[in-house]
Amino acid sequence: MSDNKKDIEALLLEERKIKAIEKIANILDNLTLWFEEIDKEEWNERLQFYLAEFLNRSPKLTKDTEELPKKDA
């Protein structure tokens, strides 16, 4: 009987996995539709603004002064 119980539990677990994957797929589908509907021109300006703010507030980026070890040719 324990084998039968394990089989039932395995089937229930698989069913829960499938339902979770279906929920994720529905959310991704909704996000896709939302991305298609947004005003991209308006968001372009917003993204540029937030990127500029991020760069202004972050420490200055500098190139690494360390040189890579040279390979023998």
Image: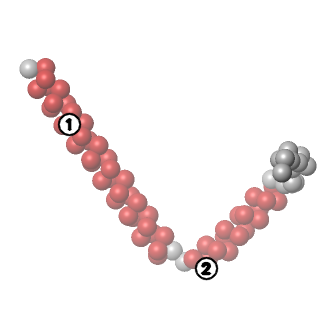
Asked whether 29 or 68 is in front, the reply is 68
Relative image position of residue 63 (x, y in whole percent): 87, 54
Real-space Cα distance between discs 2 and 1?
A: 47 Å
Neighbourhood count class around disc 2 (C-alpha, 10 Å): few under 14, some 14–19, many 20 upward:
few
- How many dots with numbers? 2
Asked whether 5 or 52 is in front, the reply is 5
Q: Which residue does the image show at 57% across and 77% down from the upper left?
A: 40
Q: Which residue does the image show at 17% across and 26% down from the upper left?
A: 6
Relative image position of residue 13 (x, y in whole percent): 24, 36
What sort of colour scheme is used for the picture?
A: secondary structure
68 relative to 48, above or below: above
Which dot marks residue 41?
A: 2
Give the amino acid at mark 1: Leu
Label whose residue precedes the other's in the sequence (2 or 1)? 1
Left or right side of 70 for 30: left
Asked which quadrant contains residue 55, the reply is: bottom right
Asked whether 37 or 2 is in front, the reply is 2
Task: Name, please, the residue furthest toward the front.
Answer: 73
Task: Name, please, the residue furthest toward the top.
Answer: 2
Left or right side of 18 for 50: right
> Are dots 2 and 1 in contact, CB under 8 Å?
no
Q: Secondary structure at mark 1?
A: helix
Q: Secondary structure at mark 2?
A: helix
Q: Nearer the viewer, mark 2 or mark 1?
A: 1
Q: Which residue does the image show at 30% across and 53% down from the upper left?
A: 22
